[in-house]
Image (tube, helix red, strand yellow):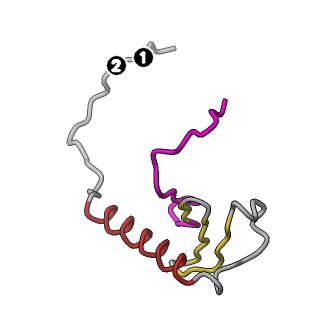
Amino acid sequence: MLTEGARSPHEVFFYHKTTALQAVRSGAWKLHVAKGKPVALYNLQQDIGEEINVMKSNPAVTRKLMAAIRAFNQDLASNSRPAGFVDNPKPLSIKAQP
């Protein structure tokens, strides 16, 4: 249930398909990217169906959202770690054998 006047605690949302970033949204703006390059910008307050690409007429918004993507990628790179492995792993529980 939506509450009138409710606000998200997040300033920016990132949309992924598997491991590939597809879009970033902040406020009314949603920027679609392909291979890290901006391809389309939509004002969702005026165009919820994402039919009118306004990227050419809003370069400052595109730059702002691309900066958010760069910051996000830097944060991921600095906070990631390789997968861990355990020598001679043992299960935490034993399931009944059939």
Horizontal side of 4 relative to 76 (left or right) equals right
List the residue tagged with mark 2. 93
Q: Quadrant of residue 51?
A: bottom right
Residue at 58% from the left image edge and 66% from the top image edge: 23
Q: Position of residue 14 (x, y in %)?
A: 51, 59
Q: Which amino acid is tagged 1?
A: Lys
| Residue visible at 27% across and 58% down in the picture | 79
The kind of residue on which mark 2 rests is Ser
Asked if the stretch drawn in magenta spans residue 2, the answer is yes
**Disc 2 and disc 1: Cα gap in Å?**
6 Å
25 sits left or right of 67 in the view: right
Residue stretch in magenta: 1-23
Outermost residue toward the left? Answer: 87
CB contact under 8 Å: marks 2 and 1: yes
Image: 9 above or below 54: above
Callout 1: SS: loop
Instruction: Determine the secondary structure under disc 2.
Output: loop
Q: Which residue is mark 1?
A: 95
Q: Residue furthest bottom?
A: 56
Rendered residue at 60%/81% (across/down): 58
Q: Which label belongs to residue 20?
A: none
Is 54 placed above or below 26 here?
Answer: below
Comparing 49 with 16, the one in front is 49
x, y (%) of residue 48? Answer: 75, 59
Q: 21 or 7, which is in the foreground?
A: 7
